[in-house]
Image (spheres, helix red, strand yellow):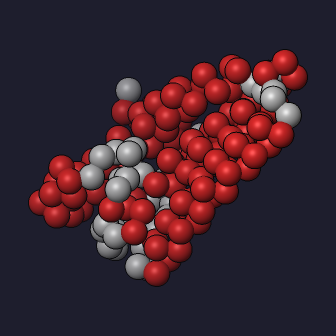
Amino acid sequence: MRTFLTKVRVWFPPPLILVLCLVMDALTATPRFTFGAVNIVVSLLLACVSLAVALHTVWQMRMKRTTLNPLHTERTTTLVTEGCYAWSRNPIYLGMSGIQLAFAFYVGSLAGILAVPLFMLVIARLHIDFEEEQLRKHFGQEWERYEQRVRRWL
């Protein structure tokens, strides 16, 4: 089972999972679930905040000179715990979830809105569980203290 999950992780990296969800949102869009300017404003605000969280996190990782690639956690050099990581252990994935929700709301995809928890579950099982296991092995007690202090999502 472990080998199968490893293959699935490689076949479905987080950005691809997000793109697949966005395509599903577009395919299931229904105009009756849109509310004109309200959809635009709420979606835009949520998308901007989500994108800002994800980009700030990328910037933090770059500044600490550690890997962003979830498929190569062995390249992690630093446990980043400041900034967005002070309130979420997975701010990039949280930002991706917000982007998916914002797009689903914008296009009026009720299925897409309801699928956000599924997106989060898939990311958690395919990627976060593995990444956190590797971080636990690599950073030991430092990771365990961080894990106890900061929630996975929010």
Q: From this viewpoint, is residue 16 visible?
A: no
Q: From this viewpoint, is residue 142 visible?
A: yes
Residue 56: x percent and y percent? 53, 68
* On screen, residue 4 above or below 141: above
Quarter of the view holding residue 143: bottom left
* On screen, residue 16 above or below 110: below
* On screen, residue 116 above or below 62: above
**Front one among 108 and 76:** 108
Residue 61: x percent and y percent? 46, 72
Q: Is residue 118 left or right of residue 100?
A: left
Residue at image position (67%, 51%) is: 45
State the residue lying farthest toward the left: 141
Q: Is residue 108 left or right of residue 115?
A: right
* On screen, residue 16 above or below 144: above
Q: Is residue 83 left or right of residue 13?
A: left
Residue 117: x percent and y percent? 51, 28
Residue at image position (72%, 33%) is: 105
Residue at image position (30%, 46%) is: 151
